[in-house]
Image (cartoon, rainbow, N blue to C red):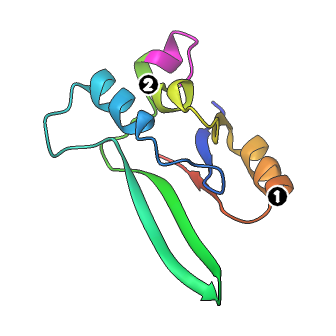
Amino acid sequence: MERHGLLINYQFCSGCHSCEVACKNVLKLPRGKWGIKLLENGPWEVTPGKFEWDYVPTPTQLCDLCADRVAAGKKPSCVHHCLSQCMEYAPLDQLANRAAELGHKTAIFIP
């Protein structure tokens, strides 16, 4: 069976938290628990007048990539609800190729 994963192109993440909310609803997680957690890096000044400020959706140990949804032919909830469309679910070899195309600020999550 071909392994799948989650590609996150956090260069375009807007920090909306839709992935967190969608995941919490699907997994029915209580307050203080997340299947995916949005982390914030910045803002900090790289050079005078130029800042770096990233939001990085980070799957946790509770993430199962929405196994039930995927088995039903659907995308994981975080991917489906991502407003900036910066997440992709696919076989790992496709994700590796896609990450190479996109360049920097990409991460691949393998459960």
Cα distance in 3D space between marks 1 and 2: 26 Å
Q: Quadrant of the image for the N terminus?
A: top right
x, y (%) of residue 50? 66, 79
Vertically, is 29 above or below 60? above
Q: Residue at x 76, y 54 (%)?
A: 99
81 relative to 85 in the view: left or right: left
Label 2 sits on a secondary structure element that is: helix
Q: Is residue 79 above or below residue 7?
A: above
**Does 71 appear in magenta?**
yes
Extreme front residue here? Answer: 49
Residue 33 falls left or right of residue 24: left
In the image, 33 versus 72, the foreground residue is: 33
Residue for badge 1: 100
Question: Magenta residues, as a range?
Answer: 69-75
What residue is at 73 percent from the left and 45 percent from the top? Answer: 95
| Disc 2 target residue | 67
Residue at 32% in and 49% down: 61
* Mark 1 Cα-neighbour bin, 10 Å: few <14, some 14–19, many ≥20: few
Q: Amino acid at mark 2?
A: Ala
User: Looking at the image, is mark 1 or mark 2 nearer the viewer?
Assistant: 1
In the displayed image of the protein, which residue is found farthest to the right?
A: 101
